[in-house]
Amino acid sequence: MDSKVSNGSSLQDERITNLLVFGFLQSCPHASFHKELEVLGHELPVHTSGSDELQTDGNRCSYFMEDAAETDSESQEAVIRDIARHLARIGDRMEYGIRPGLVDSLAAQFRNQSLSEEDRRQGLAAVLQQLVHSYPADMGQEKTLLVLTMLLARKVAEHSPALLRDVFHTTVNFINQNLLTYLRNLVQSEMD
């Protein structure tokens, strides 16, 4: 199924969302979760470029991607990192509206091991619904929701760094379920 028509997320979509959320979190230089973020970065699937990579058996790695496709992928990654940095700057300006009590309750939900991933996504959605109406509509609801989603992830990770992995994955899943079309369009418009 063509990913531009599908409402479900493909591996490419998940890669884009992973890069975006990871880049957003990396854009917080004073964060208390950098060690956890570094570990998470090693766990995420990354684009491997360069065809001269030496394998453990002594052979060179073979890539079946065409050079143009590889260049496009690298270009897309650079665009996504730029988008993430831009959205993080917007998030820095929006941070004032997030009450510590909301972050505390969201962190408590993530600490509750008896909650399912769906319960966590619903908890995140409930907090987002409380917040989204307190910001001006001039930015657009989807963009506001995207920034707030990643900002909440950052705030929870700052509050409880050990929750970074869980909050990261829930955030990626939430974006893929609720904001995927917006994210695809955002990346595509920046690529054009």
Image (tube, grey):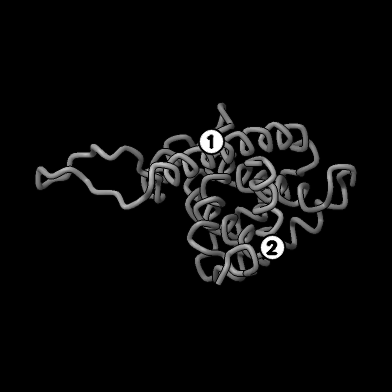
Tell which of 8 and 64 is nearer to you: 64
What residue appears at the point 59 percent right and 69 percent down from the top-left corner? Answer: 8
Query: Above or below — where is 82 with respect to 138?
Result: above
The local crowd at label 2, few if under 14, some if 14 to 19, many if 20 or more residues have their Cα within 10 Å, is: some
What residue appears at the point 75 percent right and 52 percent down from the top-left corner? Answer: 145
Tell me the quarter of the image containing the N terminus.
bottom right
The numbered dot on residue 178 is 2
What residue appears at the point 56 percent right and 27 percent down from the top-left corner? Answer: 29
Distance from label 2 to label 1 (Cα)? 24 Å
- List the residue tagged with mark 1: 78
Tell which of 130 and 38 is nearer to you: 38
What residue appears at the point 40 percent right and 45 percent down from the top-left corner? Answer: 47
Query: Above or below — where is 81 with respect to 103?
Result: above
The numbered dot on residue 21 is none
Closer to the chain start, of discs 2 and 1, is: 1
Place residue 48 in its image quadrant. top left
Left or right side of 18 for 154: right
Closer mark to the observer between disc 2 and disc 1:
1
Q: Position of residue 38 (x, y in %)?
A: 41, 38
Q: Secondary structure at mark 1?
A: helix
Left or right side of 163 for 131: right
Residue type at numbered disc 2 = Asn
Q: Position of residue 63 (x, y in %)?
A: 29, 49
